[in-house]
Amino acid sequence: MVNDKLSSRLLLNLLHSVWAIPCVLIIRLLRPIILIRIGTLFSGRIGHFAKDAGIQWIENKTNGNDINIYWLDKDTCNKQWEKMVRRNFFVHAWVEYVHVWNKYIYGGEKHYRPSSITGSRDIKGLLESNNFGMLKFLEDEEKEAKEWLINKGWNDGEPFVCIQVRDTAYLGSEEFHLNYDWDYHDYRNSNISTYILAIKWLLEQGVFVLRMGKKVNKKTPFNHPKFVDYPFCSDKSDLLDIWLFANCNLCISTGSGPDAISDIYRRPVVFLNYLPLVDMFSWSFSINYPKNLVWKDTGKALTLDDYLNYAFYFTEEYINSNIEIIDLTQEEILDVVIECWSYIQGDRVDSKNDIDMQKIFWNKIVSNKNSKDYHGYIHKKSRISTVFLDKNLHE
């Protein structure tokens, strides 16, 4: 089956070479006058698809003299975001054949437009300096999304929060991802039950709350007229998957892809129960509290320096290093959500000690060998939770 697909693709490339090779040669000849770049956007995971499109949208607007042409894979992770990309980028299927022959013919590197060169990280701070706006929803899309939310009990103008808690359901069931073994990422999963206290507190503040996700393992063990367990809504849609994250007043996430939508639309994000710490969104309004890490033999918490030095991406690496991964408690999650919401409401003022601890944290993260290349532009409201620093800074 795989060999048949490869043979079919090779044949198509050869057939299209009749017109694609002349296109490549014309593009090369035009380079002294105008640079035409060819690329795609990694569309299999919404985190990369959204972030890369958002960053490239700004770069393309800023570099107005260049022409960028794209193709997309036939299967994308979200059809609504695909529509929005197609409306705002020059996207056509034939571009892929131009890319293939640009790659085969020597000297094509200058014309290649990679999806990302920074791992979908905005280390230049482009999102914050953006003066062009982000990809817009059509009027009928806005109307449809708002009407859905109103039908669920939301009042127009009422603040709402999206909570995305990663588990194994999505990657374990989507056909697009079944060819991969995602067990190495098990350490990133969390239990929605531990977010109940935070959900209740937000509801008490008059906030409408949506637990998000396309597919999840279990329902939220909680009911309230102002709470929606979105994964179990029969009328969920790709439009809502994007619109809700793009318009929420706060996104609470475990670092699970859809938070990238909130990020490019400049919504505050609370990152909880994620690893490694070095992955934090330093270019955005974000408050971060990773999972608790303790040494198995002593039960002692890792220090901040340890978190940076043992920045692993595979579950096995933590096991082999004798490190136990412990999810945040309901109380810890609640504390961080209160901390962030108070900043959003303008009620919180940092003490001198808080400011000093944040400075120590940033000095460490930008100088550590495992994290210094991950952080260029640092947003003035990007911070590690004070709860985490109180516990881990000096131990």
Image (tube, rainbow, N blue to C red):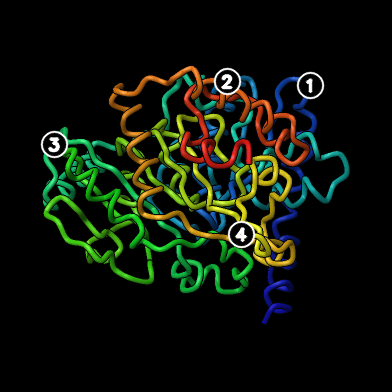
Look at the picture and state if 62 lies above or below 233: above
Residue name at image x 17 percent, y 43 percent: 204
Q: CA distance from mark 1 to mark 2?
A: 19 Å
Q: Secondary structure at mark 3?
A: loop
User: Seen in the image, is 354 located left or right of residue 199?
Assistant: right
Q: Is residue 84 above or below residue 175?
A: above
User: What amino acid type is highlighted by mark number 4?
Assistant: Gly
How far apart marks 4 and 3 lie (CA) works out to: 48 Å
Which residue position holds label 4? 299
Residue 395 at x, y = what percent? Answer: 63, 41
Query: Is there CB contact under 8 Å for labels 3 and 2?
Result: no
Disc 4 to disc 2: CB gap under 8 Å: no
Point out which mark residue 156 bears. Answer: 3
Distance from disc 1 to disc 4, alpha carbons, whole Å, reads 63 Å
> Of label 4 and label 3, which has the lower sequence position?
3
> Which labelled disc corresponds to residue 62?
2
